[in-house]
Amino acid sequence: MIASDMDGTFLTANDEYSQGRFERILDNMKARDMRFVAASGRQVKNLQELFEPTIGKGYEIDFVGSNGAMVATSQEQLYAVHLSPAQLSKVIAWNAKNPESAENIIIMTGDRATYVSNHATGPVAEMVFQFYPNVKQVEKLMEVDDHILEITFVWPNDEVQQHVAELREIFGSELHATGSGFGSVDVLGKGVDKAAGLQVLQDYYDVLDSEVMTFGDNGNDLEMLQKYPNSFVMPNANSFMLTAVQNKALNTNVNDGVLETIEHFLGI
């Protein structure tokens, strides 16, 4: 099983990937009875749309979406962990009292849609519509009628690790906070991360840890990069990630680093 983060890792830019090269690798992987997993902070629905050009040709891809809060095969959803209304209320209340959150945007990822305040405008709001499917702007987030997988805070600055550390200190025993890049911090259910999501697929397909390869570039990839021996951090990753993970991919994301490393590893 080979699992890769998307933004800053697998994708070159603007939701693009080298489709022909990737499909040749998938043909080789299928012959070896191997699976490819898109493991991302994006929702499963967004990932399915992203890979539709390849899926439409009959290729099978599995998904760990919303940073591990939802797991799906090409045929069915296997797993989902939702935040309770009480947990949502606590996190939103914390944000309201945080003086550094005056200019941030709150995004709630639900089963049916993505919800953002109707006060959201400008470049950050445009980013939300790019990376999330079926976005609905609402007046009051706590009145949304949906099951929520994660809540995301997007700050106009890049002090992500500072906010992650604070959230973990406050909610560490109940929730999981992680940084996803682009100034965003995701808050998920306890024990929810990409490694836990991959374990669901490992159990489903009977795959050992030693048979898993992973790629990533940011804090929300750290659990899966540190769990599996065959894990690679992208050369374009933040410095703290380059320090935390020993193995480096052979090239950056814009130069198909994930595909090049897979080809080298499999002898393609």
Image (cartoon, rainbow, N blue to C red):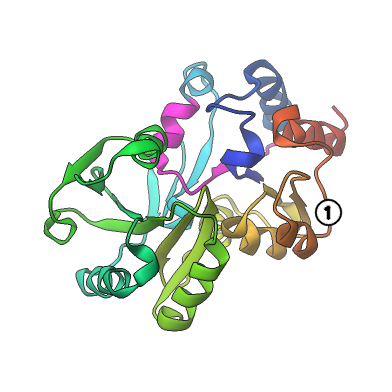
Horizontal relation, residue 124 to residue 247: left or right: left
Locate the C terminus and report the quarter of the image it occupies: top right
Residue placed at 19% from the left, 44% from the top? 118
Instruction: Check the image and report above or below for 90 versus 54.
Output: below
Quadrant of the image occupied by residue 7: top right
Instruction: Check the image and report above or below for 259 versus 65.
Output: above
Residue placed at 54% from the left, 55% from the top? 158
How would you rate the neighbour count of disc 1 (Cα within 10 Å): few for under 14, some for 14-19, many for 20 or more? Answer: some
Residue 209 visible, this orientation: no
Tag count in the figure? 1
Q: Which residues are magenta?
A: 32-51
Locate the N terminus and report the quarter of the image it occupies: top right
Q: Position of residue 88 (x, y in %)?
A: 26, 68
Foreground: 181 or 60?
181
- Disc 1 designates what residue? 247
Which secondary structure lies at badge 1? loop
The kind of residue on which mark 1 rests is Asn
Residue 92 visible, this orientation: yes
Q: Position of residue 76 (x, y in %)?
A: 38, 42
Foreground: 52 or 148?
148
Horizontal relation, residue 244 to residue 222: left or right: right
Residue placed at 56% from the left, 60% from the top? 199
Q: Position of residue 160 (x, y in %)?
A: 53, 61
